[in-house]
Image: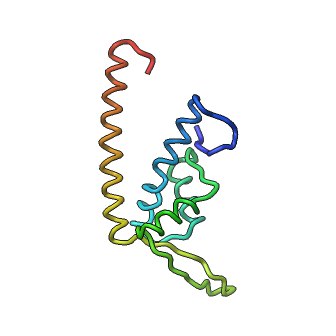
Amino acid sequence: MCIVAKKTKTSGSPAAIQVALKKATTEMMVLKLLRERPMYTYEMMSTIEERSGGDIVFNTLYLSIYRLEENGYIQKHEKVMSEDNRTRIYFAITESGSAYLDALIQGYRQYARALARVLELEQEKGGDV
């Protein structure tokens, strides 16, 4: 199941839930990667796709990166690539970004545990979950 945002109407469908989950967790994934080391945008997209086994694919991360930078959670750094003097923009997490990531992870885990309890209860009652 590959999660890719599409322009088609998916409201009220499993695809809509997958797209909403992806949007809700994008900043957390970006910050987690940047906590490991500074990266450029394409590298982040490729790493997420690879680590998810191809289930989470991004066409772009620029809106999320812009929001994170605007809020002071990440910083932009330019690195000149020696081969052809191209400039590549790298991003790094800030101290406040690291604290924000910790809060996001804590909130996500708390919500996931609560959801799991609800779904398990539904299964115990003979539901289809």
Q: Residue at x 37, y 25 (%)?
A: 119
Q: Is residue 92 above or below residue 111?
A: below
Q: Residue 19 location, x and y as percent?
A: 56, 42
**Relative image position of residue 4 (x, y in whole percent):** 62, 45
Task: Identify which residue is drawn at 52% across, 55% down.
Answer: 48
**Left-right relation of 69 to 100:** right
Count up the numbered dots.
0
Which residue corresponds to the image point at 59% horizontal and 50% vertical from the top-left? 57
> In front: 125, or 83?
125
Quarter residue 109 falls in? top left
Q: x%, y% of residue 77?
A: 51, 79
Residue 2: image location, x then y, percent: 59, 41
The relative height of residue 58 versus residue 16 in the rendered view (above or below) is below
- Residue at x-position 47% and y-position 69%: 69
Judging from the image, the colouring scheme is rainbow
Quarter of the figure that contains the C terminus? top left
Q: Quick one: quadrant of the N terminus?
A: top right
Residue 46 sits in quarter: bottom right
Which residue sits furthest top?
126
